[in-house]
Image: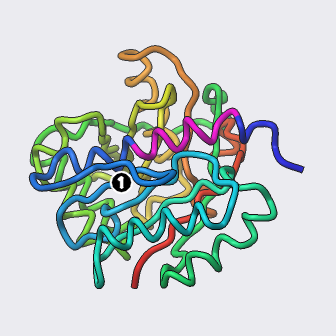
């Protein structure tokens, strides 16, 4: 049986993700953002599959509709183009959902990841004493370098692509807010927020391997959320969780609503 929360949250979650991916295009000359059938296409103008993206935006009822959307994206990026397609599986009925991977496979796109899409009305109270953490907003060369380093460690498969975007000063002039957490004389954790679609999205949370399970990521998230709420007021919070972080987010009061899958070329 479908979760009653899917219809309520899949739209805002996809809208927030779309705004997040658009922020990369907004910082790049020569980029393009356009609507295609059932989705938004974001082309940053470079050979960067992690940021050349298509994000499903609305309910899809038939296989032919998804096929049309993928075909339109393939024609845009051309043979050999590097790009990815984000799918909120709550946009499909269960019968079609079982066919999604095969549909993308016919277009030579492989599923690179699947992550629980989660939502919380507010963060739950801490269940443990959190460590002292100095949290700084990404706003200068020092914090940009730290953010890039932590992203490269946490998301090593796309390290060069992440650095290509996050190291640029003009990227941080938009709605994408980055935060770096410092403890014991070094930067140990980082994350980002985006306000769009009536929700606060949390993205790119990473911690140094030898600093994990000490509460640093939780402390960072709590301070980042407080800062955003001070500017915008309280709102629901959404994210896509890794399996490793699932227990943390559940402790923070998040509930799984749907699954977001990422299909990539190559």
Q: Nearer the viewer, residue 74 or 232?
A: 74
Q: Residue at x 34, y 66 (%)?
A: 50
Element type at marker 1? strand
Magenta span main SS:
helix
The residue sitting at the right extreme is: 1
At which x and y percent is residue 178?
30, 42
Give the magenta part as a residue range: 8-18
- Against 243, is 226 above or below? above
Q: In the displayed structure, does residue 226 sit left or right of residue 184?
A: right
Q: Which of 138 and 168 is in front in this view?
A: 168
The image quarter in which residue 51 lies: bottom left
The image quarter in which residue 173 lies: top left
Q: Which of 198 and 190 is in front in this view?
A: 198
Q: Which residue is drawn at 64% across and 33% down?
A: 120
Q: How is the image coloured?
A: rainbow
Q: In the displayed structure, does residue 55 sit left or right of residue 158?
A: right
- Against 192, is 125 above or below? above
* Number of residues whose C-alpha sits closer than 10 Å to that of mark 1, classed few (under 14), some (14–19) or many (20 or more): many
Quarter of the image for the C terminus: give it. Answer: bottom left
At which x and y percent is residue 38?
51, 51
At which x and y percent is residue 227?
38, 24
Is residue 178 one of those drawn in magenta?
no
- Against 100, is 203 above or below? above
The count of marks equals 1
Give the residue at mark 1: 188
Q: In the displayed structure, does residue 261 sit left or right of residue 3?
A: left
Q: Residue at x 69, y 33 (%)?
A: 8
At which x and y percent is residue 255?
72, 42
């Amino acid at each position: 049986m479908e979760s009653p929360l899917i219809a309520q949250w899949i739209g805002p979650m996809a809208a927030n993700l779309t705004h997040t991916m658009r922020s990369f295009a907004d910082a790049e000359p020569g980029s393009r953002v356009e609507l295609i059938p059932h989705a938004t296409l974001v082309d940053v103008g470079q050979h960067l599959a992690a940021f050349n993206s298509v994000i499903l935006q609305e309910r899809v009822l038939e296989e032919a509709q998804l096929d049309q959307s993928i075909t339109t994206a393939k024609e845009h990026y051309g043979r050999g183009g590097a790009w990815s397609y984000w799918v909120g599986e709550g946009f499909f009925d269960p019968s079609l959902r079982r066919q999604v991977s095969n549909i993308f496979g016919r277009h030579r796109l492989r599923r690179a990841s699947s992550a629980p899409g989660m939502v919380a009305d507010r963060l739950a109270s801490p269940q443990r004493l959190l460590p002292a953490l100095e949290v700084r907003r990404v706003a200068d060369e020092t914090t940009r370098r730290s953010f890039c380093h932590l992203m490269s460690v946490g998301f090593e498969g796309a390290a060069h692509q992440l650095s290509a975007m996050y190291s640029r000063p003009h990227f941080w002039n938009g709605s994408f807010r980055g935060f770096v957490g410092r403890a014991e004389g070094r930067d140990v954790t980082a994350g980002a927020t985006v306000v769009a679609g009536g929700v606060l999205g949390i993205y790119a949370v990473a911690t140094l391997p030898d600093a994990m399970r000490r509460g640093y990521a939780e402390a960072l998230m709590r301070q980042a959320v407080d800062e955003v709420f001070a500017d915008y007021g309280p709102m629901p919070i959404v994210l896509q969780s890794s399996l490793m972080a699932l227990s943390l987010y559940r402790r923070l009061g998040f509930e799984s609503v749907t699954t977001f899958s990422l299909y990539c070329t190559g």
